[in-house]
Image (cartoon, helix red, strand yellow):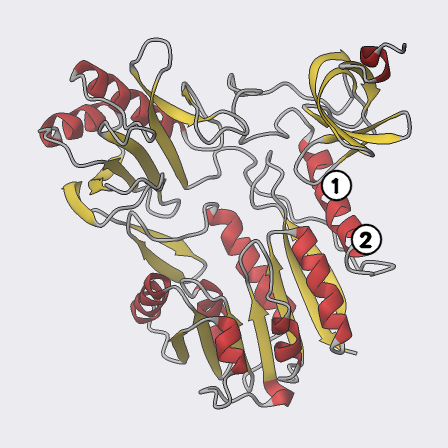
């Protein structure tokens, strides 16, 4: 009788050939693909197989036998524990090339584009300390039962490790984490336990403005009988003098989200001001805003160039969020019409337009598909002068949206995507309805992570 362990080995020696979308290395064993966590092209690794399917195995590297020449030393002591920076040990230029390749392959395999019109990836000006926001979670350490504060283990929504450092954010963020953790442990304040819906401290959200240098801290808790305002505020301000605002938010819902219905400003203004290009934005603790401010400005400039706007154009901005792309285009066109279903985002968009004196932008709070299907739209869609901008969620477009957008006869469509697979699928749908892909340009919003942003341009065939 054959030895089953010999037929299905647990440990394999593998040569990593490529990098898959999601950041795992690609190797081959006995004619099947093996996706390897922690493996980079050029590595030879010993890998532990943890999942088997007929033609695809999944494994994690337990030892690097021969490192790739493109491996680099990690800055962060949490590498391998935290799931945020899967590519931190891979040369940055190689990261960019891999992201271009991933978009290109998705367009070929899923979009049916034989020769994808790719452009080089736009690198981030700062590969480290680029994030302007980070959510840190409080949790109960399993063995000691003490409060900890940090980020989630790779692939685990239910486990948190105690954070010492994070190089995606400025050092002030980790300093705030350490100060809050020490204060709460000294006061014996319990961390929130989702399973039992008990405890108090839930999240510490830190935001910064690149333009103004303001630093805003949001302390998210459950309801509890604790008098912490003066002590918490003093502890954080001593440890991090750069803090300009501290907000306390109460969230009694079971959902592990760093938002709440009750907010109290404990110190400072309780908001911060950011500037992108010529525009200023007021950011509250729960506002959505691009988490890489400098690269967001580069992205919006790229969208403007891709749209090639003219003074007689009408812009239809679908999935417009807080209106940043619409505001960027507004001074260059006749009018902008923004469609967004999230009421809070539309409220922020109106505030942003008012703050910046932009008067030729209109906002509607409605689902994009519903609006496109409407028989009487409140927007002048003149085919010869219409530009459409799409910035959909990660899942991409509803299958009917490309057909309805194509029916407007737009002279140009600019699609901002954060998911190459969804973009590729939608490229095929636009092709069905008479629009060809003119260009695809990746932009690296999140260095050292597997995320890929891309600006695609469509024109009528």
Question: What is the quadrant of the N terminus in the image?
Answer: top right
Q: Is residue 140 visible to the viewer in this orientation of the structure?
A: yes
Q: Position of residue 135 (x, y in %)?
A: 38, 36
What residue appears at the point 54 percent right and 38 percent down from the top-left corner?
126
- Dot 2: within a 10 Å radius of its alpha carbon, few (fewer than 14), some, or many (20 or more) residues? few
* Number of residue marks: 2
Question: What is the quadrant of the C terminus in the image?
Answer: bottom right
Is 26 placed left or right of 229 in the picture? right
Rendered view: 152 above or below 64? below
Q: Choose top left, top right, bottom left or bottom right for residue 206.
A: top left
Q: Which residue is mark 1?
A: 97
What residue appears at the point 34 percent right and 66 percent down from the top-left corner?
343
Is 85 placed left or right of 276 in the picture? right
Give the foreground label among 1 and 2.
Answer: 2
Secondary element at tag 1: helix
Q: Is residue 269 visible to the viewer in this orientation of the structure?
A: no
């Amino acid at each position: 009788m054959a030895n089953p362990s010999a037929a299905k080995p647990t440990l394999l020696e593998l040569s990593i050939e490529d990098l898959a979308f999601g950041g795992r290395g690609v190797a081959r064993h006995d004619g099947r693909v093996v996706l390897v966590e922690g493996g980079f092209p050029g590595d030879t690794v010993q890998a532990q197989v943890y999942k088997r399917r007929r033609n695809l195995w999944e494994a994690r590297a337990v030892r690097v036998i021969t490192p790739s020449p493109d491996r680099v030393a990690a800055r962060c002591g949490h590498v391998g524990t935290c799931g945020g920076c899967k590519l931190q040990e891979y040369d940055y230029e190689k990261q960019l090339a891999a992201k271009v390749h991933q978009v290109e392959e998705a367009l070929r395999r899923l979009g049916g584009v034989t020769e994808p019109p790719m452009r080089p990836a736009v690198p981030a000006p700062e590969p480290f300390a680029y994030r302007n926001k980070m959510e840190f979670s409080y949790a109960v350490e399993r063995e000691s039962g003490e409060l900890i504060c940090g980020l989630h283990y790779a692939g685990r929504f239910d486990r948190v490790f105690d954070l010492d450092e994070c190089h995606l954010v400025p050092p002030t963020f980790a300093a705030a984490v350490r100060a809050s953790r020490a204060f709460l442990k000294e006061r014996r304040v319990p961390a929130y336990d989702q399973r039992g819906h008990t405890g108090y401290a839930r999240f510490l959200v830190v935001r910064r403005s690149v333009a103004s240098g303001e630093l805003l801290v949001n302390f998210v808790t459950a309801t509890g009988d604790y008098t912490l305002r003066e002590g918490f505020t003093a502890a954080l301000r001593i440890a991090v003098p750069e803090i300009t605002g501290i907000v306390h938010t109460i969230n009694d819902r079971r959902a592990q989200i760093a938002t709440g219905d009750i907010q109290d400003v404990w110190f400072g203004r309780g908001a911060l001001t950011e500037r992108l290009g010529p525009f200023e934005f007021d950011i509250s603790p729960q506002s959505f805003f691009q988490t890489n401010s400098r690269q967001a400005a580069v992205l919006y400039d790229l969208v403007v160039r891709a749209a090639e706007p003219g003074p007689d154009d009408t812009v239809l901005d679908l999935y417009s969020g807080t209106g940043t792309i619409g505001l960027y285009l507004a001074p260059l066109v006749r009018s902008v019409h923004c469609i967004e279903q999230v009421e809070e985002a539309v409220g922020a968009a109106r505030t942003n337009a008012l703050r910046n004196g932009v008067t030729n932008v209109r906002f509607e709070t409605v689902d994009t598909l519903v609006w496109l299907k409407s028989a009487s739209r409140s927007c002048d869609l003149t085919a010869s002068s219409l530009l459409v901008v799409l910035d959909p969620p990660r899942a991409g477009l509803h299958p009917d949206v490309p057909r309805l957008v194509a029916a407007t006869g737009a002279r140009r469509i600019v699609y901002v995507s954060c998911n190459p697979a969804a973009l590729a699928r939608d490229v095929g749908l636009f092709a069905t309805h008479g629009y060809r892909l003119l260009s695809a340009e990746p932009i690296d919003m999140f260095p050292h992570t597997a995320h890929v942003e891309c600006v695609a341009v469509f024109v009528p065939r």
